Image (spheres, coloured by chain):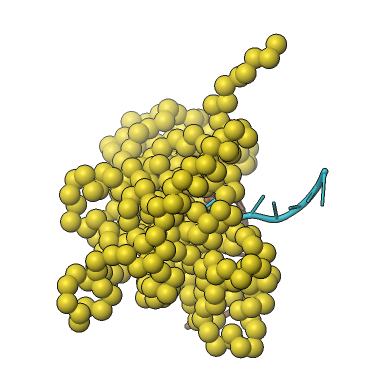
Chain colours: A yellow, B cyan, C brown
Amino acid sequence: MEETLPEPQGASSQDHQNWITAQDILREKLITEDSFTWKLASQEEGETLRYVGGVDISFSKDDPSKACATLVVLDFLTLQLVFQDFSFVTLQLPYVPGFLAFREAPVLLQLLEKMKRSNNPFYPQLLMVDGNGILHPRGFGLACHIGVEANLPTIGIGKNLHHVDGLNQSRVRKLLEAEENSSKNFINLVGCSRQIWGAAMRSTQGSIKPIFISIGHRISLETAIIIVQITCKYRVPEPIRQADIRSRDYIRKLEMNAKVKIDSQPKASYSQQYPKLDQIVSRMILGALSVTRQRIMIKLPEKEMNLPRHWESPDSSPNAVEFFVPLLPFINGVNLHFGPQIGYV
DNA sequence: GCGACAG
DNA sequence: ATCTTGTCGC
């Protein structure tokens, strides 16, 4: 009766050991100093930094294994987007603290590979990663992992602190607020062992919550900090922020999978009866995912979810269109008619 | 032993 | 990561 059942999802302790070994091996290739051909200052001779990439993954709220991976590239000078690509995937592994890379790196590397293979002129010279670099229990976080495997200079950006070497949120906050640091916008993260793991940075003037910068691969902390400062319009550097925004937007559109039928062109009586509905529709129609003759897909704001009971039984007029609203459990008393999943772009 | 733990 | 409500301020 010692049957070993397969573990399609989840991570066994054997996985843990394998992961640790893999991280140890990859870490031998890690380069922790500036190692690139470009320069920051355009006055100098030669290649200058022009294309900065950012990667992020957003998740489905319905099914946490469904995710949208996003790669963006921004012009370093203007911070304008010059490239974006998405990959909607089902992740096979769970998130385990300290092993984020095994969940997220493969699909992100795939996006980079695809871009490189097609000889895209905007292929990034530097990549910012939503997650830590060497600020990690074994000094090899997601940003290092991607950097080594893609052989790209990478910077890790954490929005929360991963507790390493005695570092924790409150201690860092005290350090940032300390008298001698009150004028600085960043401080080094020095652990109990005196090692410097990265930097905590107030990226926006007066912002309380810092971001946590650590080197990924082929870059020094000093250079990484400079580049992060330059690319911060808001708290999170723009390449990461754009990847995050666009990733979330992409997946949000795919989540609109419940439908309800209403009139395509609301009659006067209909509008009078449900004035609020008209407001919603006219406001949301601009943000519609796609519009065909028969269907309009929109997302209704949460606060408009107390749908009129009337929607339960849409009239069968030929003008009827289908509105797609989020599949949520708390639509008061309205028994929505759920249609088939519609594939849309 | 227990809690803490990037996304 | 994701959920959610209002609230404050430019």
Residue A76, quarter of picture? bottom left
Between A107 and A263, which is closer to the camera in this rendering?
A107
Residue at position x 56%, y 53% in the image: A138
Q: Is residue A219 visible?
A: yes
Quadrant of the snapshot with the C terminus of chain A: top left
- Residue A55 relative to residue A66: left or right: left
Between A258 and A139, which is closer to the camera in this rendering?
A139
Q: Is residue A86 visible?
A: no
In this rendering, the answer to whether A323 lies above or below A300 is above
- Residue A4 relative to residue A159: left or right: right
Number of marks drawn? 0
- Which residue, as the protein is rendered here, is positioned at the far top? A1
In this rendering, the answer to whether A247 lies above or below A215 is above
Quadrant of the snapshot with the N terminus of chain A: top right
Residue at position x 41%, y 30% in the image: A341
- Residue A166 relative to residue A310: left or right: right
Residue at position x 46%, y 45% in the image: A25
On the image, the x and y values in percent for residue C4 come to: 61, 53
- Which residue, as the protein is rendered here, is positioned at the far front? A28
Residue at position x 44%, y 70% in the image: A221
On the image, the x and y values in percent for residue A101 come to: 48, 47
On the image, the x and y values in percent for residue A247 come to: 40, 51
On the image, the x and y values in percent for residue A116 come to: 23, 48
In this rendering, the answer to whether A47 lies above or below C5 is below
In this rendering, the answer to whether A329 lies above or below A79 is above
